[in-house]
Image (cartoon, grey):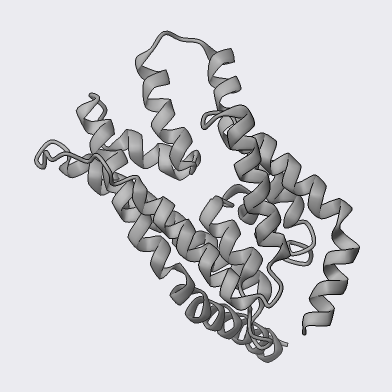
């Protein structure tokens, strides 16, 4: 009886370790971007008068880069929980669409599902949704380790930034472009992988149209709604074109 339990435990450990080894290379570009922005965020918190505990716990619990930067101003301003709620929903509303896209992929992941939902940031979604996971690698463990590693990168970067913020002072203007560059690289990788580029072109067209109609501050949610609607309506023709191109 104990022997069977030991064998089962060993198999689970082997599956977890294999998934970790497979997931880690996917997260290396995220590491570079998260550390740059995390350090910037930690330093920003420090110069705003907060100890390193603030960026540590905020990164651990909120885990939303753009929202965490906004929270600094909310903490420094007057107490207004309704405004904080509205800002949080507006900034992170795109995760609703991420969640819908991941419904099928999260099936069968067991206890890991709760953490996968909590830790799904933009970059983690991009990897877990598009990665070609080898057949011998457990899908649930792969997505779990991608999520864990990305959060470790962000939490460690912001905490170190909070610790050294009082010692290192430099102009951080322009560092936030690191994440923009990262998404450009991810987009190009997907473009090269796909033989049919209709989905990418629909996404680009919808984003440009909404940017023109709503402006740079308000185009994100409308563009995502337009993309979702267009892909839903055109799902069958796009699947037929994708199948014909294979």
Above or below 73: residue 187: below
Relative horizontal placement of residue 18, taking residue 130 as reference (left or right): left
Please name the residue shown 62% across and 52% down the image. Answer: 204
Q: Nearer the viewer, residue 138 or 14?
A: 138
Q: Nearer the viewer, residue 25 or 179?
A: 179
The spot of residue 185 in percent (x, y) is 46, 64
Relative horizontal placement of residue 55, taking residue 112 as reference (left or right): left
Q: Is residue 102 visible?
A: yes
Relative horizontal placement of residue 110, taking residue 27 as reference (left or right): right
Residue 149: quadrant of the picture: bottom left
Above or below 186: residue 131: below
Please name the residue shown 64% across and 36% down the image. Answer: 210
The spot of residue 191 in percent (x, y) is 59, 70
Residue 78: quadrant of the picture: top left
Q: Nearer the viewer, residue 178 or 199?
A: 199
Q: Quadrant of the N terminus?
A: bottom right
Furthest toward the left, the residue is 167
Residue 7: quadrant of the picture: bottom right
Q: Nearer the viewer, residue 135 or 172?
A: 172
Above or below 123: residue 22: below
Q: Is residue 111 visible?
A: no
The spot of residue 148 in percent (x, y) is 50, 60
Q: Quadrant of the C terminus?
A: bottom right
Please name the residue shown 52% across and 32% down the image. Answer: 216
């Amino acid at each position: 009886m104990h022997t069977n339990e030991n064998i089962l435990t060993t198999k689970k450990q082997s599956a977890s370790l294999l998934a970790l080894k497979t997931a880690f290379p996917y997260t290396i570009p995220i590491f570079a971007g998260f550390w740059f922005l995390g350090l910037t965020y930690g330093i920003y918190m420090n110069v705003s008068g907060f100890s390193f505990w603030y960026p540590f716990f905020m990164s651990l619990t909120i885990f939303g880069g753009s929202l965490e930067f906004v929270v600094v101003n909310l903490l420094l301003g007057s107490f207004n929980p309704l405004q904080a709620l509205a800002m949080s929903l507006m900034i992170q509303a795109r995760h609703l669409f991420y969640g819908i896209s991941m419904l099928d992929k999260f099936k069968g992941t067991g206890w890991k599902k709760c953490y996968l939902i909590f830790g799904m940031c933009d970059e983690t979604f991009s990897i877990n949704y598009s990665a070609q996971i080898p057949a011998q690698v457990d899908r649930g463990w792969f997505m779990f380790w991608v999520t864990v590693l990305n959060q470790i990168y962000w939490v460690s970067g912001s905490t170190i930034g909070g610790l050294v913020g009082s010692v290192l002072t430099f102009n951080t203007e322009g560092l936030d472009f690191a994440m923009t560059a990262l998404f450009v690289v991810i987009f190009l990788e997907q473009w090269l992988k796909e033989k049919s580029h209709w989905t990418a072109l629909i996404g680009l067209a919808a984003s440009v149209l909404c940017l023109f109609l709503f402006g740079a501050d308000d185009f994100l949610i409308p563009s995502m709604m337009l993309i979702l609607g267009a892909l839903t309506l055109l799902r069958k023709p796009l699947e037929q074109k994708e199948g014909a191109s294979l």
